[in-house]
Image (tube, helix red, strand yellow):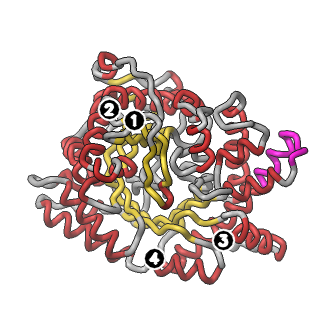
Amino acid sequence: MALNYTAEEIMQTIRMVQSENLDIRTITMGISLRDCCHEDMTATARKIYDKICKKAEKLVATGEAISREYGIPIINKRISVTPISMIGESCLHGSYVELAAAMDKAAHETGVNFIGGFSALVHKGYTSGDRRLIEAIPQAMAETERVCSSVNIGTTKAGINMDAVCQMGQIIKQTAELTKDRDAIGCAKLVVFCNAPEDNPFMAGSFHGVGEPETVINVGVSGPGVVLAAIRNHPEWDFNTLASVIKRTAFKITRMGELVGREAGRRLDMPFGIVDLSLAPTPAIGDSVADILEAMGLERVGGHGTTAALAMLNDAVKKGGAMASSNVGGLSGAFIPVSEDAGMIRAVEEGALCLDKLEAMTCVCSVGLDMFAVPGDTTAEVISAIIADEAAIGMINKKTTAVRVLPVPGKKVGDQVEFGGLLGRAPIMPLHTYDPKIFVKRGGRIPAPICALTN
């Protein structure tokens, strides 16, 4: 499909890149590893390494060439693979940590920033491979640099696997403890999903779904600064006008993302999959979803009106993207990670934004409770209860929700953790201390809602 651009559109895009922080957040190559199964763990690891290196050997160079030629920043080049729980299931002996090490080695060899897919899908129950992978997560996250992990514990069709929810609270705590010398950085590479999409290009939740082709190129764009500039330039707009302008802005951003994705696919001789038009913020000033909401008239994110403002923003972004491309997928909307958004950090520090309000906002945003830090003495059961709450929002509302929480050993409310780069910094947030142990340990499965019966 040819995308024809007018001179005015080209100049607008140049301005967005130069002064409004517009970028392609990631080009993510999805790679199927279904032909890498072997009964020997070491042989499987070798096949995983060889295939990733072969398929992705030109990914980084291609992304850099497109960036230079089109003048569009492409921040990350990433890889997602088939959930490793499935690939290692044929192995008779050994630890899945060996497979994570092979993924990490391949990521270093190909030069990508991250590789996702150390994952398991257990929304309706476990297989032996799922159990072995989940048990390996803490060590794998501690011993690798670029490997990301995800576990899907619920869907609208299946309900919520509370056995997995309970276990993931313990796994997150173990991961934090094994990486305590780095402020629990392992937890930043681990996310727990409800309704996980198979074509998400963003980390840490990216994996190559079983319904995906052999290889595919997915693109994640980002443009909070562009939307913010449009709103700030016209404070007199009513909401109808504001929504229309956000839609037009999202249209332009999505068109740029599809152009880059199709060009990358052509050069790498593989199909273009989707463009995820999520507004993914960074710690940089002017690149914040929170700032967008405040530009609409809120004194501070977290105050009354925040959820309504976020709902309008998310809907307008999705409508604009759908008008621009038939290949919109992934998550697509507005991200609200605490540590990665300067405005969210400010709101938490000032006491305007608490976890309860953040949870309410996830009812209408793209993902869920993302990159928030909590006291190191938070129990596994409290973490599991947070996951259960967020999964319930996703299950009932037929949307993706997720939890990426960092219980930082030795830290308490009022402290800070500094990660740098896109991960930013996180103030330690207070939690309810009431004990949910009996609830989360009941086990079994919270049944799917009646809206699951849509066949």
Residue 156 in view (yes/no): no
Amino acid residing under circle 2: Asp
Tell me which corner region of the image, top left, top right, bottom left or bottom right, holds residue 110.
bottom left
Residue hosting label 3: 1
- Say which of marks 4 and 2 sits in front: 2
Question: Which residue in the rendered view is the most extreme toward the right?
Answer: 236
Q: Which mark is residue 333?
A: none
Left of 338 or right of it: where is 11? right
Residue hosting label 2: 377
Q: Residue at x 28, y 28 (%)?
A: 163
Q: Nearer the viewer, residue 239 or 91?
A: 239
Q: Residue at x 39, y 35 (%)?
A: 412
Image: magenta residue range: 235-248
Query: Quick one: label 1, few (<14), some, or many (20+) residues within 10 Å?
Result: some
Q: Locate the N terminus by quadrant.
A: bottom right
* Mark positioned earlier in the residue sequence (4 or 1): 4
The CA span between labels 2 and 1 is 8 Å
Residue hosting label 4: 60
Q: Position of residue 309 (x, y in %)?
A: 72, 37
